Image (tube, helix red, strand yellow):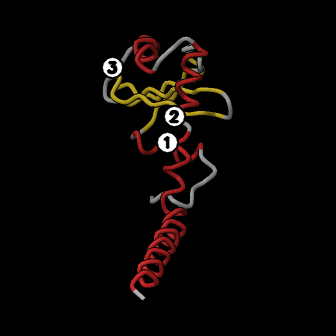
Amino acid sequence: MKRRAVVRNTVLAALGIVAVGLIAWPVYAHCGVCAGSAKDMVAAMDGGKTTLAKVIPTAEASSKGRAVKATCYMEGKNMEYHVYCLVGDMLKRVELDSTGKVTESEDVKTIADAGDHDEKHEHKEGIKK
């Protein structure tokens, strides 16, 4: 009788863990997808022979400002870097490709207004505004 109760409790615990995982998956799916692409980002950096640290001076030179935030994203199989630079009293978003060349530059009111992460991802269900 005790053995049967142990087996039953073990099975119920395992089912409970699976149920919690299935319920929590949609909530954490957004972060899981982004974190899962970190290996792809490193591979793209290696392929492009550049890093986030290397694109910052390029963005600063291009904008004639100082970097306050830098991030990278995967656009399909291509790496994209965004560096936010303070130029006087304005913020400028400098976009660079996987080789570290500037592809676009634009003024933004705030870093949040640029909406990089939210706009670039198709899986918005887990994002809070």
Residue plotted at (49% across, 50% down): 31
| For residue 92, above or below residue 36 | above
Residue plotted at (40% across, 12% down): 57
| For residue 32, above or below residue 111 | below
Give the mark nearer the N terminus: 3 vs 2. Answer: 2
Question: Please, what is the three-letter code of the amino acid marked with disc 2?
Answer: Ala
The quarter in which the C terminus is drawn is: bottom left
Question: Please, what is the three-letter code of the amino acid marked with disc 1?
Answer: Ala
Question: Which of the 4 image quarters holds residue 36?
Answer: top right
| For residue 111, above or below residue 42 | below
Indicate the position of residue 66 as horizontal and vertical percent values: 33, 20
Q: Nearer the viewer, residue 41 or 111?
A: 41
Label 3 environment density (alpha carbons within 10 Å; few <14, some 14–19, many ≥20): some
Name the residue tied to disc 3: 66
Name the residue tied to disc 2: 38
Q: CA distance from mark 3 to mark 2?
A: 26 Å
> What kind of element bears circle 3?
strand
